[in-house]
Amino acid sequence: MTTLTVEQRPQVSAGRLIATLGGAGALAGLALVFVYQITQPRIQAHKAEMLRRAIHEVLKDPARYETLYLVDGKLTTDGKGGDRVYLGYDENDKPVGFAIAAGEPGFQDVVKLIFGYDAVKKTVIGMRVLESKETPGLGDKIEKDDGFVGQFEGAATPLQGVKAGRGKGGEQEIDMITGATISSRAVIRIINNALKRWRPHLEAYGR
Protein backbone atom coordinates (compact mmCIF):
# COMPACT_ATOMS: atom_id res chain seq x y z
CA MET A 1 0.00 0.00 0.00
CA THR A 2 1.29 3.41 -0.99
CA THR A 3 1.20 6.02 1.75
CA LEU A 4 0.26 9.54 0.65
CA THR A 5 2.00 12.32 2.46
CA VAL A 6 0.55 15.80 2.81
CA GLU A 7 3.03 18.48 1.87
CA GLN A 8 3.68 20.78 4.76
CA ARG A 9 3.43 24.45 3.85
CA PRO A 10 5.85 26.72 5.62
CA GLN A 11 4.16 28.84 8.23
CA VAL A 12 4.39 32.58 7.88
CA SER A 13 4.87 34.50 11.06
CA ALA A 14 2.30 37.11 12.00
CA GLY A 15 4.99 39.76 12.09
CA ARG A 16 6.10 39.03 8.55
CA LEU A 17 2.50 39.03 7.33
CA ILE A 18 1.82 42.38 8.97
CA ALA A 19 5.03 43.82 7.52
CA THR A 20 4.10 42.62 4.02
CA LEU A 21 0.60 44.08 4.23
CA GLY A 22 1.96 47.29 5.68
CA GLY A 23 4.49 47.63 2.89
CA ALA A 24 1.82 47.04 0.25
CA GLY A 25 -0.42 49.62 1.88
CA ALA A 26 2.41 52.14 2.01
CA LEU A 27 3.18 51.63 -1.68
CA ALA A 28 -0.49 52.03 -2.57
CA GLY A 29 -0.63 55.22 -0.53
CA LEU A 30 2.45 56.62 -2.22
CA ALA A 31 0.95 55.79 -5.60
CA LEU A 32 -2.26 57.67 -4.71
CA VAL A 33 -0.29 60.70 -3.54
CA PHE A 34 1.77 60.65 -6.74
CA VAL A 35 -1.32 60.44 -8.95
CA TYR A 36 -3.01 63.22 -6.95
CA GLN A 37 -0.01 65.52 -7.32
CA ILE A 38 0.12 64.86 -11.03
CA THR A 39 -3.61 65.28 -11.75
CA GLN A 40 -4.59 68.02 -9.26
CA PRO A 41 -3.03 70.94 -11.19
CA ARG A 42 -4.77 69.75 -14.35
CA ILE A 43 -8.10 69.43 -12.53
CA GLN A 44 -7.76 72.92 -11.05
CA ALA A 45 -6.77 74.36 -14.42
CA HIS A 46 -9.82 72.73 -16.03
CA LYS A 47 -12.14 74.12 -13.34
CA ALA A 48 -10.65 77.58 -13.79
CA GLU A 49 -11.19 77.40 -17.55
CA MET A 50 -14.80 76.26 -17.12
CA LEU A 51 -15.43 79.14 -14.72
CA ARG A 52 -13.85 81.62 -17.13
CA ARG A 53 -16.10 80.42 -19.93
CA ALA A 54 -19.16 80.58 -17.69
CA ILE A 55 -18.37 84.16 -16.63
CA HIS A 56 -18.01 85.21 -20.26
CA GLU A 57 -21.29 83.48 -21.10
CA VAL A 58 -23.43 85.08 -18.39
CA LEU A 59 -21.87 88.53 -18.92
CA LYS A 60 -22.20 88.27 -22.72
CA ASP A 61 -18.48 88.20 -23.53
CA PRO A 62 -16.99 91.14 -21.66
CA ALA A 63 -13.65 92.50 -22.82
CA ARG A 64 -12.23 91.58 -19.43
CA TYR A 65 -13.27 90.89 -15.87
CA GLU A 66 -11.75 91.14 -12.41
CA THR A 67 -12.33 89.18 -9.22
CA LEU A 68 -13.75 91.06 -6.24
CA TYR A 69 -13.54 89.65 -2.72
CA LEU A 70 -15.91 90.40 0.13
CA VAL A 71 -13.74 91.59 3.02
CA ASP A 72 -15.20 93.19 6.14
CA GLY A 73 -18.47 93.86 4.36
CA LYS A 74 -16.86 95.58 1.36
CA LEU A 75 -15.81 94.44 -2.09
CA THR A 76 -12.12 94.74 -2.87
CA THR A 77 -9.64 93.45 -5.41
CA ASP A 78 -7.03 92.94 -2.70
CA GLY A 79 -8.60 90.01 -0.87
CA LYS A 80 -7.80 86.33 -1.16
CA GLY A 81 -10.08 83.32 -0.90
CA GLY A 82 -13.51 83.50 0.66
CA ASP A 83 -16.62 84.88 -1.01
CA ARG A 84 -16.18 86.55 -4.36
CA VAL A 85 -17.93 87.93 -7.41
CA TYR A 86 -16.63 88.89 -10.85
CA LEU A 87 -17.04 92.32 -12.43
CA GLY A 88 -16.99 92.50 -16.20
CA TYR A 89 -15.94 95.47 -18.35
CA ASP A 90 -16.58 96.37 -21.98
CA GLU A 91 -13.96 97.46 -24.52
CA ASN A 92 -14.18 101.04 -23.16
CA ASP A 93 -13.46 99.73 -19.65
CA LYS A 94 -16.98 100.48 -18.45
CA PRO A 95 -18.58 97.97 -16.04
CA VAL A 96 -21.16 95.74 -17.71
CA GLY A 97 -22.26 93.69 -14.71
CA PHE A 98 -21.38 91.23 -12.00
CA ALA A 99 -21.14 87.45 -12.33
CA ILE A 100 -22.30 85.69 -9.16
CA ALA A 101 -21.94 81.99 -8.38
CA ALA A 102 -24.37 80.40 -5.91
CA GLY A 103 -25.93 77.09 -5.01
CA GLU A 104 -28.79 75.60 -2.99
CA PRO A 105 -30.65 72.27 -2.78
CA GLY A 106 -32.78 71.33 -5.76
CA PHE A 107 -34.94 68.20 -6.14
CA GLN A 108 -32.11 65.63 -6.11
CA ASP A 109 -29.06 67.46 -4.82
CA VAL A 110 -27.44 70.87 -4.65
CA VAL A 111 -27.81 72.92 -7.83
CA LYS A 112 -24.87 75.23 -8.52
CA LEU A 113 -25.17 78.04 -11.03
CA ILE A 114 -23.69 81.36 -12.05
CA PHE A 115 -25.60 84.39 -13.31
CA GLY A 116 -24.84 87.85 -14.58
CA TYR A 117 -26.44 90.85 -12.90
CA ASP A 118 -26.76 94.47 -13.95
CA ALA A 119 -26.74 96.40 -10.67
CA VAL A 120 -27.94 99.59 -12.38
CA LYS A 121 -30.93 98.13 -14.20
CA LYS A 122 -31.45 95.46 -11.53
CA THR A 123 -31.84 92.80 -14.21
CA VAL A 124 -30.31 89.40 -14.89
CA ILE A 125 -27.91 89.39 -17.83
CA GLY A 126 -27.69 85.63 -18.26
CA MET A 127 -27.71 82.34 -16.33
CA ARG A 128 -25.86 79.05 -16.59
CA VAL A 129 -26.10 75.93 -14.44
CA LEU A 130 -22.64 74.80 -13.37
CA GLU A 131 -23.49 71.57 -11.57
CA SER A 132 -26.72 69.61 -11.24
CA LYS A 133 -27.85 66.05 -10.49
CA GLU A 134 -31.50 66.71 -11.23
CA THR A 135 -33.65 63.98 -12.82
CA PRO A 136 -32.54 63.21 -16.40
CA GLY A 137 -35.18 64.21 -18.93
CA LEU A 138 -37.03 66.41 -16.44
CA GLY A 139 -35.06 68.36 -13.84
CA ASP A 140 -31.95 68.51 -15.98
CA LYS A 141 -33.88 70.75 -18.39
CA ILE A 142 -32.87 73.66 -16.16
CA GLU A 143 -29.53 73.50 -17.97
CA LYS A 144 -30.50 71.87 -21.28
CA ASP A 145 -33.73 73.66 -22.18
CA ASP A 146 -32.74 76.77 -24.12
CA GLY A 147 -36.25 78.17 -23.76
CA PHE A 148 -36.04 78.06 -19.98
CA VAL A 149 -32.46 79.34 -19.74
CA GLY A 150 -33.11 82.12 -22.26
CA GLN A 151 -35.87 83.63 -20.12
CA PHE A 152 -33.34 84.90 -17.59
CA GLU A 153 -31.70 87.25 -20.06
CA GLY A 154 -33.01 90.72 -19.22
CA ALA A 155 -35.42 89.49 -16.53
CA ALA A 156 -36.15 92.02 -13.79
CA THR A 157 -35.41 91.07 -10.19
CA PRO A 158 -36.60 89.71 -7.87
CA LEU A 159 -37.61 86.88 -10.17
CA GLN A 160 -41.08 85.36 -9.99
CA GLY A 161 -41.73 81.77 -11.04
CA VAL A 162 -45.04 81.08 -12.79
CA LYS A 163 -46.59 78.00 -14.31
CA ALA A 164 -45.93 77.77 -18.03
CA GLY A 165 -48.47 79.79 -20.01
CA ARG A 166 -50.16 81.27 -16.93
CA GLY A 167 -48.08 84.38 -16.47
CA LYS A 168 -49.21 87.94 -17.09
CA GLY A 169 -46.19 88.92 -19.14
CA GLY A 170 -44.39 90.66 -16.30
CA GLU A 171 -40.69 91.43 -16.64
CA GLN A 172 -40.00 89.44 -13.46
CA GLU A 173 -41.81 86.28 -14.59
CA ILE A 174 -40.01 83.05 -15.40
CA ASP A 175 -42.08 80.19 -16.86
CA MET A 176 -41.22 77.08 -14.89
CA ILE A 177 -40.67 73.77 -16.67
CA THR A 178 -43.72 71.50 -16.67
CA GLY A 179 -42.88 68.35 -14.72
CA ALA A 180 -39.82 69.97 -13.16
CA THR A 181 -41.30 72.80 -11.12
CA ILE A 182 -39.17 72.01 -8.06
CA SER A 183 -35.94 72.24 -10.06
CA SER A 184 -37.17 75.35 -11.88
CA ARG A 185 -38.18 77.00 -8.63
CA ALA A 186 -34.78 76.13 -7.15
CA VAL A 187 -32.98 78.10 -9.87
CA ILE A 188 -35.21 81.13 -9.28
CA ARG A 189 -34.78 80.85 -5.51
CA ILE A 190 -30.98 80.58 -5.78
CA ILE A 191 -30.76 83.78 -7.82
CA ASN A 192 -33.17 85.72 -5.59
CA ASN A 193 -31.43 84.64 -2.39
CA ALA A 194 -27.99 85.42 -3.82
CA LEU A 195 -29.14 88.91 -4.75
CA LYS A 196 -30.61 89.52 -1.30
CA ARG A 197 -27.17 88.90 0.09
CA TRP A 198 -25.02 90.55 -2.57
CA ARG A 199 -27.09 93.51 -3.82
CA PRO A 200 -26.09 95.98 -1.06
CA HIS A 201 -22.40 95.25 -1.67
CA LEU A 202 -22.74 95.42 -5.45
CA GLU A 203 -24.61 98.73 -5.38
CA ALA A 204 -22.14 100.22 -2.91
CA TYR A 205 -19.07 99.23 -4.93
CA GLY A 206 -17.44 102.12 -6.75
CA ARG A 207 -19.38 104.88 -5.01
Image (spheres, grey):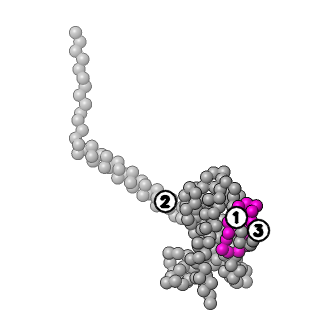
**Front in this rendered view, residue 27 or 95:** 95
Quadrant of the drawing holding the N terminus: top left
Point out residue 145 in the picture as x, y percentages from the top left corner.
Answer: 71, 58
Q: Quadrant of residue 147?
A: bottom right
* Structural distance between the alpha carbons of marks 2 and 1: 48 Å
Task: Examine the residues drawn in magenta and state their main secondary structure.
Answer: loop
First in sequence, mark 3 or 2: give its number: 2
Point out residue 30 in the picture as x, y percentages from the top left corner.
Answer: 39, 55
Q: Which mark is residue 162?
A: 1
Q: Secondary structure at mark 3?
A: loop
Q: Secondary structure at mark 1?
A: strand
Q: Is residue 164 magenta?
A: yes
- Looking at the rendered image, the disc whose residue lies closer to the viewer, 3 or 2, is 3
Q: Which residue is mark 2?
A: 38
Q: Is residue 165 above or below residue 17?
A: below
**Front in this rendered view, residue 118 or 184:** 184
- Looking at the rendered image, the disc whose residue lies closer to the viewer, 2 or 1, is 1
Tell me the amino acid under the disc marked 3. Answer: Lys
Q: Which residue is mark 3?
A: 168
Q: Is residue 25 above or below residue 68?
A: above
Tell me the amino acid under the disc marked 2. Answer: Ile
First in sequence, mark 1 or 3: give its number: 1
Which stretch did the figure color magenta?
A: 150-168
